[in-house]
């Protein structure tokens, strides 16, 4: 008996998103390594934590596909982009990545509505909310760097920014513990 409650198109779309989240994890890990190498340990730590959060998102997709009777497909993950030239380029890359991810999330929501797959539509609402938070977080990084002086920031203001991000909460939850109220 076939117990898969996902259409072929939906299973593929969800697997693709699982892989997109894994790629995001690699991108943020790569950016974190770049920041660490430049001496920005606070920014690096922030990006490492964000990389773990993206990995948790991929696991959340994997578990959902399995719970609906499907089989997630792990694809080759593209290499992360080249190292950024500056903190501005790094933070702009984080923001662009989040906006691209939001677009991909919305495509799955559209597909779930098209297919009247209300279970998947409901599942995706957590990610719609999460992307609002992710884009806001990325925008805040850009804003904080602008306030510090952007690419012409003084060493002192960059030190303060780095320290601020180092002290940001280190509470990345496990995917299986996440809820709509506590992503």
Image (cartoon, grey):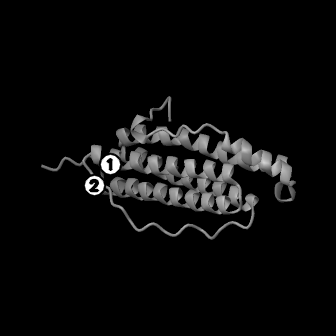
Q: Residue 74: x percent and y percent?
A: 36, 61
Q: Is residue 179 left or right of residue 117?
A: right
Expressed as whole percent of the image width and height from the top left, the position of residue 39 reads 71, 58
- Cα distance in 3D space between marks 1 and 2: 6 Å
Determine crowd level at label 2: few under 14, some 14-19, many 20+ residues with C-alpha closer than 10 A: some
Q: Is residue 178 left or right of residue 101?
A: left
Secondary structure under the numbered disc 2 in the rendered image: loop
Res 100 label: none
User: With respect to residue 177, does 113 lie above or below?
Assistant: below
**Side of 14 where 104 appears, left or right:** right
* Residue with the most extreme top position: 181
How crowded is the residue under tag 1: few (<14 C-alpha within 10 Å), some, or many (20+)?
many
Q: Residue at x 60, y 40 (%)?
A: 133
Under tag 1, what secondary structure? Answer: helix
Q: Label 1, on which residue?
A: 65
Contact flag, marks 1 and 2 (Cβ < 8 Å) = yes
Between 18 and 49, the residue placed more toward the observer is 49
Query: Which residue does the image show at 56% across and 58% down from the upper left?
Result: 29
Q: Could you tell me residue 167's position as x and y percent?
A: 67, 39
- Residue under label 2, please give it: 71
Would residue 84 be visible to someone looking at this image? yes
Q: Residue furthest left?
A: 1
Residue for point 67% across, 59% down:
35
Look at 52% across and 69% down and name the residue there: 79
- Which of the two labelled residues, at mark 1 and mark 2, occupies the earlier sequence position? 1
On the image, the x and y values in percent for residue 140 come to 72, 44
Q: Does residue 144 appear in this view? A: no
The quadrant where residue 179 appears: top left
């Amino acid at each position: 008996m076939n117990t898969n409650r996902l259409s072929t198109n939906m299973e593929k779309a969800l697997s693709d998103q699982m892989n997109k989240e894994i790629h995001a994890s690699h991108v943020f890990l790569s950016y974190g390594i770049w920041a660490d190498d430049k001496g920005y340990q606070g920014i690096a730590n922030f990006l490492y934590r964000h990389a773990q959060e993206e990995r948790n998102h991929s696991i959340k997709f994997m578990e959902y596909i399995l719970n609906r009777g499907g089989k997630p497909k792990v694809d080759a993950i593209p290499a992360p982009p080249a190292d950024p030239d500056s903190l501005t380029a790094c933070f702009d890359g984080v923001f662009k990545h989040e906006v691209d991810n939001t677009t991909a999330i919305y495509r799955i929501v559209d597909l779930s509505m098209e297919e009247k797959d209300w279970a998947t539509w409901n599942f995706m609402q957590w990610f719609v909310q999460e992307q609002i938070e992710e884009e806001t977080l990325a925008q805040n990084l850009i804003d904080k760097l602008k306030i510090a002086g952007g690419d012409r920031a003084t060493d002192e203001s960059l030190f303060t920014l780095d320290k601020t991000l180092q002290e940001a909460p280190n509470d990345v939850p496990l995917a299986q513990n996440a809820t709509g109220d506590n992503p």
